[in-house]
Structures are given as C-alpha cells and as structure tokens.
Image: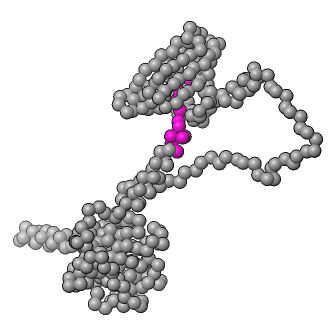
Amino acid sequence: MTRLFLMTASLAALAACATPLPGPAIHTGGDTPGNAGTFTRAVPLEEERPEPVAIVETATPLPLPGQLKPLTKSPVKPATPMPPDKAIAEGRSGALIEPSLDGFMNAVQIYPYTEGALYRLYASPGQVSDIALQPGETLVSVSAGDTVRWIVGDTVSGTGPGARAHVLVKPVGPGLRTNLMIATDRRTYHLELESTAESYMAALSWRYPQDELTALTARNAQAAAAEAVSIRQGIDPAALDFGYTVSGDRPPWRPVQVFDDGRQVFIRMPEAVGASDLPPLFVLGAKDRVELVNYRVRGTWYIVDRLFEAAELRLGEKPQRVVRITKTPASAARRPGSQPRIQDGGRP
C-alpha cells in the first residue's frame, strides 16, 4: 500500500513538471476588430558588419586675423643667418625623441613613428638591444656610422604575413655614440645610439598612427558599402508578394512598404527615421498562435526571418502608438511592383 501511494505521488509530480509554462505575451485588449489575439515581441538580431568609427585628426593651427602683427613703418631688419653647425645642432636636437616612462610596454619602449624623427636607443656593453620593426615589414638595408665598436645584426621572428624583422645592436664599450639608419619596403628609421655603463633598453618598436588612420578610413568605407548594399541578393521579382495592409496610427515611423519573397518579410521604414526611433516588432501567427520570430534591421529595412499573418509595431506607453501589418487573403497577393495598401484615418 505504501509503495502504491509513493508511485502515485511520483506520477503526479512528473505530470506537473511536464505542464508547459505560458510564454511572455502581450494582449491586444481587443482594440482592433477582426484581429484579436496575443502578440509576442520578436527578437531583433545584431548583424555582424563593420561599424563606422569617428576619426579625430589633429587640427593644424592657422594664424587668425587677431593674431597677425601690424606692419611697422620702419623696415624690419633681416635676421642674422645662423651658422650651419649651430642650425644643424638645433635641428637635430628638435627632432630627437627620448624614451619616456609612459612609452614602455613591459620592457619595450614604443615610439610613435614620425617620418624624419630621430629615436634614441641606450645600449650597454654585454647586452643586446632589439629593434623590432612592424609585422610584415621587409628589411632592405641597415647602415651604422661606427661598425667597429658597434656590433649590428638582424633576424626574423614568426612566419608568413606576420613575420617580423629585428635589428640587434650591441656596443663593445661604454661612452660610445653613433647613428643607425634602417631602410625597409615601407619606411626609413633613423636612430641615435648611445652606450652607458649600466642602463640599457632591452627592446624598442613603433606604433604607426598614419597606418591606424588609414585602417579606420578603410573600415568606414567598408561600413558605408555594407550600408549601401541591397537588403538581400538573389530575390526573384516574380515571387514577391505585396499582399499586406498597413493600418493603425500614423507616427513618423509608419512603414511605407511591406512584401515577402515566400521566406522572409521585408518592412521598409521612412528614410528620415533614425535607428534610435525604430519601434520593436510583435508578431501573431496563423490561427492566433503566438510565434517567436527573429528579425534584423538593415538601414531602413526590417527583415523578418519568417512569414506572419499579423504583426504590430509599438512604441511608447501613454499614449502608445501602434501600427498593424496584416496579411491579406491569397486572392489579393502576388502583385509584383504594387505598393502596400494604407488605410486612412487613425487606428481602425
């Protein structure tokens, strides 16, 4: 008797667990005649495509009218020409870039590459300093001013497109100075080498702001091209079905065209509507069955991944603006090139 009671209780518990739970639903409240049912919100999908980025370039200062100095009546005496050796020293000093604490990534000093700049490298006897070039950059030649007291070599790390060239330098003693010029298939590097008794730089490399700007510009071009591409390729015009009625409120985001190709429904929104103003989509399937569908937004188009009998676009709460999209009978469907029928007035 006890076993029979336990088996009965277990079967009752299993039956309770097997009872389906109602999904999230939004009731229309019977505000639209002839289409009473339960709508469920569709799930928008994010398309993987390049997104445009904002490019901020360094502004070039120009003299303003208020910054211009007035002309004097007396002639301006020409500046005394600077001796060549002093001009060279000042020009070289102004182009020299020293290592900084903020520029270190672990033990690597990373300089911003600028054409014509001089980059300082501190080395030490008995230590090898590594000069790492850009991945994929091909080393053409290396020239040093002092090849007797400075040992210079090169090597490559990695393989394929990510292979990276390295120039290795080592002084034979402290207190030595020379310069180094590295030529590659992309650019030229100028370095000032100085040896010290103790301190040395284990490695240095560069980041390339101009290349980064070029990559961002190319990414924006790809994003613009993806945005300009048609909503879908390979659509058969003869299979398009424009048998949809758009009714309800008349907000700025009211659809201007609805059709399907037998597999997906395409909803075209007004051109002036921004992406932040687009409303969510709620779908009601055949025989008032609640259906969960996926859709994606491409430009001004909603692309719904399956067909539906009725759908609503809703935005706001009090008041809530509702636009309904209804599939018309099959006799009115399949009219290539026709436009959706828009009912006059407010909500039906």
The part of the image, by quadrant, that contains residue 196 is top right
Q: Please give the range of residues in magenta.
A: 197-213
Q: Is residue 197 visible?
A: no
Q: How many marks?
A: 0
* Residue drawn at 37 percent across, 33 percent down: 161
Left or right? Give the position of 7 relative to 319: left
Residue drawn where x is 40% and y is 61% of the image: 228
Q: Where is residue 336 in the image (x, y as percent from the top left)?
A: 26, 76
Image coordinates of residue 28 in percent, x first then y, are 34, 84
In the image, residue 151 lies at what x, y percent? 52, 12
Is 86 above or below relative to 75? above
Q: Residue at x 49, y 27 (%)?
A: 184
Q: Quadrant of the N terminus?
A: bottom left
Write the residue at 30% across / 67% down: 294
Q: Does the magenta stretch include residue 205?
A: yes
Q: Camera-side residue: 144 or 289?
A: 144
Quadrant where the image shows the C terminus: bottom left
Please name whichever residue, 14 or 317, is drawn nearer the observer in this view of the structure: 317
Position of 297 with respect to 205 (left or right) is: left
